Amino acid sequence: MIAVGISLVNSCESCLEWHIKQVLDAGATEGEIIEALEVGFEMGIGPTTVTSRFAMKVLKHYLGGQA
C-alpha cells in the first residue's frame, strides 16, 4: 500500500499498475487503495492530480469497471 502512494507521488504510471494489481491480489479493498492514493495525493498536491486520474482508471480496470 505504501508503494501505491509513493508511485503516485513519483508519477510512475507503470509502478501504479503493478502495485495496484499486487495489493488487490493480496486482498486489499477498493477503499483501502483509495485511502493510500489520498495520502499520496496529499503529499504531492498539484502534480499528482493527473496521475491520480490514471490510478483510478487502473483500479477500475482491475475491479472490472466497478470503481
Image (cartoon, grey):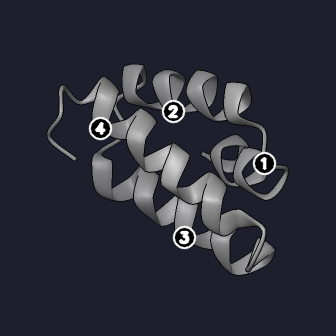
Measured as percent of width and height from the top left, residue 37 is found at 55, 60
- Quarter residue 48 falls in: bottom right
Measured as percent of width and height from the top left, residue 16 is found at 63, 35
Badge 1: residue crowd in 10 Å (few <14, some 14–19, many ≥20): many
- Quarter residue 27 falls in: top left
Disc 1 marks a residue whose amino acid type is Ser
Depth-wise, is mark 1 or mark 2 nearer the camera? Answer: 1
**Disc 3 to disc 1, how far (Cα)?**
14 Å
Reading the image, the residue beneath label 2 is 20
Disc 4 marks a residue whose amino acid type is Lys
Reading the image, the residue beneath label 4 is 60
Element type where label 3 sits in the image: helix
**Disc 4 to disc 1, how far (Cα)?**
18 Å
Disc 3 marks a residue whose amino acid type is Glu
Disc 2 marks a residue whose amino acid type is Ile
Measured as percent of width and height from the top left, residue 13 is found at 69, 34
Reading the image, the residue beneath label 1 is 11
Reading the image, the residue beneath label 3 is 38
Measured as percent of width and height from the top left, residue 55 is found at 52, 45
Sooner in the amino-acid sequence: mark 3 or mark 4: 3
